Image (tube, rainbow, N blue to C red):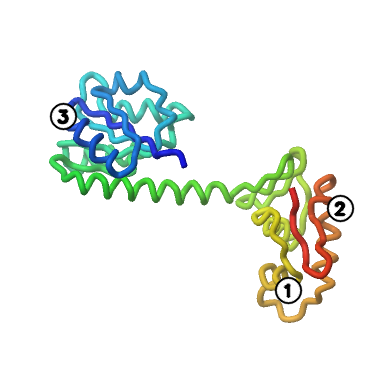
Amino acid sequence: MTATRILVVDDEEDLCEILKFNLEIEGFEVDTAYSAEEALKKDLAVYNLLLLDVMMGEISGFKMARILQQDEKTVNIPIIFLTAKDTENDMLTGFNLGADDYISKPFSIRQVIARVKAVLRRTAEKSKEKEVEKLEYETLALDTKRIKATVDGVEVPLTKKEFEILKLLLENKGNVFSREEILSRIWKDEVYVLDRTIDVNITRLRKKIGPYGKNIVTRLGFGYCFEC
């Protein structure tokens, strides 16, 4: 598993080294920069999180955050501001710049580590939510937010049930679902639905998704699955 990479940017060199040492004990891979100028020379896109001091030289932490927001490669990197400034206006500025957290100096190392882990957890959860918004297999794509299916970029008109069946199968490629399982997941509380209803919807779905119809495989006596 690739280690989580963190960049600590602070003009207090001793503080950088203390944070680096303690975060590495927690299993993180940590680099340091003693100014925003030095940090901006790095490939920032490789980092999973930035610990960013506000009060630094010509380029402040706030200014650096604005620079990161203008680049699509770095706009989504989580930022925790570290600062001796703890006024409400400064905190609001930080959060308006997209900060994920704001820690006032002096702070305990345990506090920083706890906040870092909390931000990384939230970021991972958001990432998973974004991932499920679009399901893809080659040129077959399902946009689960806009409820839209496309093949080779061309929209395929699916009914609600057809869409939900395809979503279930694409989310669980290789897993076989019995007719009973599909009924309970897709039709849920509907009182009377025949097993034959599943077969009819699958047949229509196969035709509509063209070349990918063959990927919806029947396992005789078991059910259906989407095979890659």
Tell me the tag on residue 207.
2
Q: Residue at x 38, y 35 (%)?
A: 5
Give the x, y percent position of residue 94.
28, 38
In this view, 20 is above or below 162: above
Label at residue 142: none
On the rendered structure, is 81 left or right of 139? left
Q: Nearer the viewer, mark 2 or mark 1?
A: 1
Horizontal side of residue 64 vs 193, given as left or right:
left
The image quadrant that residue 139 belongs to is top right
Check disc 1 and report the residue beneath it.
180
Mark 1 to mark 3 CA distance (whole Å): 63 Å
**Closer to the N terminus: mark 1 or mark 3?**
3
Q: Locate residue 172, reporting x and y percent.
A: 66, 56
Badge 2 local density, few (<14 within 10 Å), some, or many (20+)?
Answer: few
Please name whichever residue, 154 or 37, is drawn nearer the observer in this view of the structure: 37
The residue identified by callout 3 is 14
Question: What residue is drawn where x is 15% and y is 36%?
Answer: 84
> Mark 2 or mark 1, which has the lower sequence index?
1
Provide residue 121's location: percent of width, then percent of height.
Answer: 39, 50
The amino acid marked with disc number 3 is Asp
Element type at mark 3: helix
Three-letter residue code for mark 1: Glu
Q: Nearer the viewer, residue 3 or 73?
A: 3
Residue type at the position of mark 2: Lys
Q: Secondary structure at mark 2?
A: helix
Is 55 rendered above or below residue 123? above
Of labels 2 and 3, the one closer to you: 3
Residue 33 percent location from the top left of the image: 27, 24
What is the crowding at mark 3: few (fewer than 14 residues within 10 Å), some, or many (at least 20)? few
Q: Residues within 10 Å of mark 1 (few under 14, many from 20)?
A: few
For marks 1 and 3, give the one nearer the viewer: 3
